[in-house]
Amino acid sequence: MTLPDRWTDRLTLPVVCAPMFLISNPAMVITACSAGLIGAFPRQNTRTTGEFESWLRTIRTALDARPADTRPAGPLAVNIPTTTERAQLDTDLDLCRQYDVDVIITSVGDPSALTRLAHDRGLLVHHDVTSIRFAEKAIAAGVDGLNCIGSGGGGHSGGISHLALIPRIRAMFDGTISLAGAVAHGAAIRAAEVLGADLAFIGSRFAATAESDANPRQKDWMIAGDSRALRYTNRVNGIPANWMLESLAQHGIDIDALPAPARRGSDHLPAGVAPWRDLWSAGQGIELIDDAPPIAEVIARLSRQYLAACEADDHAEAVRASLHPWDERITDGVS
């Protein structure tokens, strides 16, 4: 397991509250960081540099105002596109440094240039990957962490089972690894660690909370729906994701009749319809979502579930004692 030493006394739960486009907001980030999680939001959720700085100032002021005798706040992360123009990128990264952001999260595209600029400012970079090939490219770019999105994730999901993806990437990468996709229960956080990840990356479960800026109808469908209401496809915007079929239907879109775009984009969609704003995604973790309580309550539940899963590890000695001595058999030449 590989986490920065400076995070040791700041994380109470090995979880990233994922940055979600048009959903994450300062209230969610403040609550997550205050509870000892990594709180994150996308730069794209703010429309101007001034608004971006305002969000950072609001978050940092709230976290710094916590009582001195409380546990340090969890790390702060910002998702910045790799395609951001250089002048804007410099400005955004300078603001991140000014307001003590810990991690820059990047996704689609080559993170090489952004990683160099972030490192120059003492910022860590974690890149989203959905395949071994993308992981290899991100490692070559010098990133500090990989958010490994396996099958069942929501926005821009991968198609590989975590059971194979995480151990494979751990064997080739000694940086921080986050398991992302379909995590909605504390036991899954523990499972991520068992597989070799350092953190669990959670989106949909936090999208269905009172503070979330997700559309109320999207929240309702996440609560009432299950994985049968999702379709994993690249037909919406050119990149595979799990899309909510009901959100497509409300705009008259038949996913089976929708042609796949030749490249990333949404020009083939009905006029005025935009992915994420009008068409929504969710991970298979909605199988475990049946309400939208305050985010603090979700964190408390995840913590209790995670603790119970960790305590279950106590039976390891009994299991070990019950196993056959296979190593001795192999040594003796018995197959």
Image (cartoon, rainbow, N blue to C red):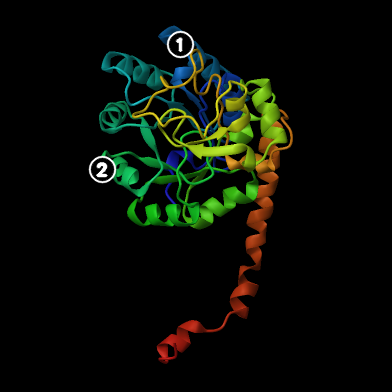
Instruction: Give percent across and percent down for residue 323.
Output: 58, 79
Q: CA distance from mark 1 to mark 2?
A: 32 Å
The residue at which mark 1 appears reads as 47
Instruction: Give percent across and percent down for residue 286.
Output: 64, 39
Q: Nearer the viewer, residue 175 or 233?
A: 233
Tag 1–tag 2 contact (CB < 8 Å): no
Using the rendered view, name the quadrant where residue 227 is placed.
top right
Give residue 280's mark: none
The residue at which mark 2 appears reads as 140
Q: Nearer the viewer, residue 30 or 245?
A: 245
Residue ID at (47%, 50%): 197
Q: Is residue 305 left or right of residue 16?
A: right
SS at mark 1? Answer: loop
SS at mark 2? Answer: helix
Using the rendered view, name the quadrant where residue 115 is placed.
top left
Instruction: Give percent across and percent down for residue 208.
Output: 66, 30
